Image (cartoon, helix red, strand yellow):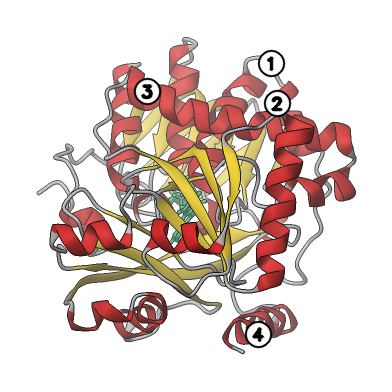
């Protein structure tokens, strides 16, 4: 069965058939060794292989086993932070470059799906909804700013009554509709990228956890049963990096986020909730996000924890949040509940960089990784084949380290996150 070895989720239950790939056994040689089989690693492998590089990708579990196979599937424009904030933090020139790269990221996802005929339930449009009047004001200002300063006319502010019609709930004060965004089935997208990478000649191995590596005439990368001697190494492990590379572990904090899938809804209910089949996300600090699957399940995400391990009853935790928006779904069955781990950075902008000329990394997409990790792969491939401008635009974002480096090593930070999560509820 194709989804064996994935966590139990609606995505795994609806995954397309994909071959189980063998583990790496013995020694191999490659131009580039990529560690991690999520969007970052798969897109890197695909773009390098298309440029003629000999690539080996090592995934500890299954392709798409990490956040890439478990997420909300929202493919948003821009970066994780509002453009107006980026201008203040980074200056208008750098903010503009990142805006353009954000547009390129969504266009790249769309182009890859089309070029490689990836069947992943692609839909258009994200509605951002405001819980508070101040959130609505912020969305109104941001929509005007994007239209005026960036000429981005695909987005507009929507008043309260229209927001209610678009999302079938009266609880929101207004919203921002971004018709330029996409949404998709994340695991089938990852599996499609993997098929494309293999088709371009990349060698992908599953069940091949990298246990360490050593520099010296390139990099020697070890797994339990084999090793790869490569000229370059790309670390694409995001929230699952663990202790593999302590020098970048401190740049990120892994956090767990949760999702549920309802039973299939009847057409009238689905049309009331989401008549235009948009993806929707709200303005909470711990964001709620949802969309309808092709078989009309509500796929609803929300809730976080900051320790290793998921809470015992994810379904109840996320259902409570869903009912706060859609009380009419109280009698609907929850068929699937699951969690995943993503990496955030302190500034909520991704961390790209080089640990040595031959060792590159990209991670910490802070909940915006479907587009940005896909783009990261293209930019990592570019940096390796001498077109580093896009990679360097991300690499020059100032990054601060979390005190510590892995889950549970920074209680002060966790307290801060819990404080903001509590404010959502007040
Ligand atoms: C519940 C949830 C909802 C989300 N919703 C959204 C959303 O709607 N929109 C959005 O843009 N983003 C969302 N995100 C974030 C997004 O999923 C991630 O940013 C993105 O998938 C990161 O891709 P990646 O390839 O860098 O990491 P991952 O997909 O996590 O892949 C990393 C891979 O590295 C492997 N690995 C780790 N260590 C090793 C090792 N030593 N050897 C070999 N392999 C190793 C892991 O097994 C894993 O498969 C969400 C995340 C979660 C968890």
Which residue does the numbered mark 4 point to in the structure image?
Answer: 423
Residue 22 percent location from the top left of the image: 23, 39
Secondary structure beneath disc 4? helix
Q: CA distance from mark 2 to mark 3?
A: 23 Å
- Asked which quadrant contains residue 403, the reply is bottom right
Q: CA distance from mark 2 to mark 4?
A: 37 Å
Q: CA distance from mark 4 to mark 1?
A: 44 Å
Q: Residues within 10 Å of mark 2 (few under 14, many from 20)?
A: some
Viewer-closest of 24 and 272: 272
Left or right: 13, with 180 as reference point: left
Most distant residue in the bottom direction? 426
Secondary structure beneath disc 3? loop
Q: CA distance from mark 1 to mark 2?
A: 8 Å
Q: Is residue 217 visible?
A: yes
On residue 390, the disc is 2
On residue 202, the disc is 3
- Asked which quadrant contains residue 138, the reply is bottom right
Secondary structure beneath disc 2? helix
Q: Residues within 10 Å of mark 4 (few under 14, many from 20)?
A: few
**Comes first in the chain, label 4 or label 3:** 3
Choose mark 1 or mark 2, whichever is in front: 2
**Comes first in the chain, label 2 or label 3:** 3
């Amino acid at each position: 069965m194709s989804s064996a070895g994935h966590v139990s989720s609606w995505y795994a239950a609806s995954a397309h058939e994909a071959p189980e790939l063998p583990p790496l056994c013995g020694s191999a040689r490659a131009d580039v060794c990529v560690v991690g089989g999520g969007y970052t690693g798969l897109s890197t492998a695909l773009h390098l292989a298309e440029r003629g590089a000999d690539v080996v990708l090592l995934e500890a579990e299954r392709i798409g086993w990490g956040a890439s196979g478990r997420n909300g599937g929202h493919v948003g424009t821009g970066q994780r932070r509002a453009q107006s904030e980026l201008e203040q933090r980074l200056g208008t020139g750098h903010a503009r470059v990142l805006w353009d790269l954000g547009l390129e990221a969504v266009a790249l996802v769309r182009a890859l799906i089309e070029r490689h005929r990836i069947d992943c339930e692609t839909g258009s449009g994200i509605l951002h909804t405001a819980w508070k009047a101040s959130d609505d004001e912020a969305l109104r200002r941001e929509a005007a700013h994007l239209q005026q300063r960036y000429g981005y006319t695909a987005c507009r502010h929507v008043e309260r009554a229209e927001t209610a019609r678009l999302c079938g709930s009266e609880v929101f004060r207004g919203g921002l509709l971004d018709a330029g965004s996409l949404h998709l089935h994340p695991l089938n997208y990852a599996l499609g990228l993997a098929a494309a990478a293999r088709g371009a000649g990349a060698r992908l191995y599953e069940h091949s956890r990298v246990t360490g590596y050593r520099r010296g005439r390139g990099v020697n990368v070890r797994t339990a049963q084999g090793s790869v001697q490569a000229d370059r190494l790309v670390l694409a492990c995001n929230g699952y990096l663990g202790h593999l590379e302590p020098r970048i572990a401190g740049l990120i904090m892994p956090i767990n986020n949760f999702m549920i899938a309802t039973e299939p809804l009847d057409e009238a209910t689905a049309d009331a909730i989401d008549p235009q089949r948009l993806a929707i996300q709200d303005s909470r600090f711990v964001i709620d996000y949802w969309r309808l699957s092709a078989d009309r399940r509500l796929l609803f995400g929300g809730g976080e924890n900051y320790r290793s391990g998921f809470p015992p009853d994810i379904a109840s935790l996320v259902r409570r949040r869903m009912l706060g928006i859609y009380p009419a779904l109280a009698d609907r069955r929850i068929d699937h509940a699951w969690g995943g781990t993503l990496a955030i950075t302190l500034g909520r902008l991704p961390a790209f960089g080089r640990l040595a000329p031959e060792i590159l990394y990209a991670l910490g997409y802070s909940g915006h990784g479907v587009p940005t990790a896909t783009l990261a792969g293209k930019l990592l491939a570019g940096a390796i084949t001498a077109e580093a401008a896009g990679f360097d635009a991300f690499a020059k974002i100032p990054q601060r380290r979390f005190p510590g480096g892995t889950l549970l090593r920074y209680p002060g930070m966790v307290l801060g996150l819990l404080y903001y999560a509590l404010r959502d509820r007040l």
